[in-house]
Amino acid sequence: MVDSSDRMRIKVARSELEMILENKNINAKLPFLFFANKNDLKGACSLEEVSELLELSSLSRTHLIVSCSASTGKGIQEGVEWLCGLIKLQLETTNRN
């Protein structure tokens, strides 16, 4: 989860993401779910801006970025449903083999 209203924190999050991506112990097939919190605040970055600051277009793995509000819960269900759908699909694929 990143704070869409704080560009500096988004840049710090990008640095943290780079460290995660470089970690050999993390499966390269694992999807990433990003929540852009406070996206509804005046002056906050748009989803496109957050995606650009995080350099998500360079990710070679499945990912989704969702606008959310942690205080109201808006957007959380959308992201969790996406992730659950991926897990279900993977389990179905694994069970077929």
Image (cartoon, helix red, strand yellow):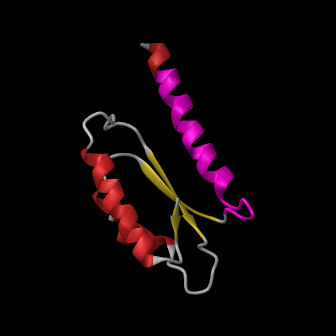
Q: Vertical placement of 51 versus 85: above or below?
A: below
Pinpoint residue 72: horizontal percent, then vertical percent: 75, 64
- Name the residue located 35 percent from the left edge and 36 percent from the top edge: 29
Which of the pair 71/50 is nearer the observer? 71
* One can see residue 86 in this view: yes
Which of the pair 65/44 is nearer the observer? 44
Q: Is residue 89 magenta?
A: yes
Q: Quadrant of residue 88?
A: top right
Q: Main secondary structure of the magenta part?
A: helix
- Name the residue located 67 percent from the left edge and 62 percent from the top edge: 70
Pinpoint residue 36: horizontal percent, then vertical percent: 54, 65
Q: How many marks?
A: 0
* One can see residue 60 in this view: no
Which of the pair 5/55 is nearer the observer? 5
- Name the residue located 64 percent from the left edge and 76 percent from the top edge: 40
- Name the residue located 52 percent from the left edge and 73 percent from the top edge: 4
Q: Is residue 32 magenta?
A: no
Q: Quadrant of residue 42?
A: bottom right
Quadrant assignment for the C terminus: top left
Q: Vertical placement of 38 versus 31: above or below?
A: below
Pinpoint residue 10: horizontal percent, then vertical percent: 42, 69
Query: In the figure, is residue 15 to the left or right of 84?
Result: left
Pinpoint residue 77: horizontal percent, then vertical percent: 68, 51
Q: Residue furthest bottom?
A: 43
Q: Which residues are magenta?
A: 70-93
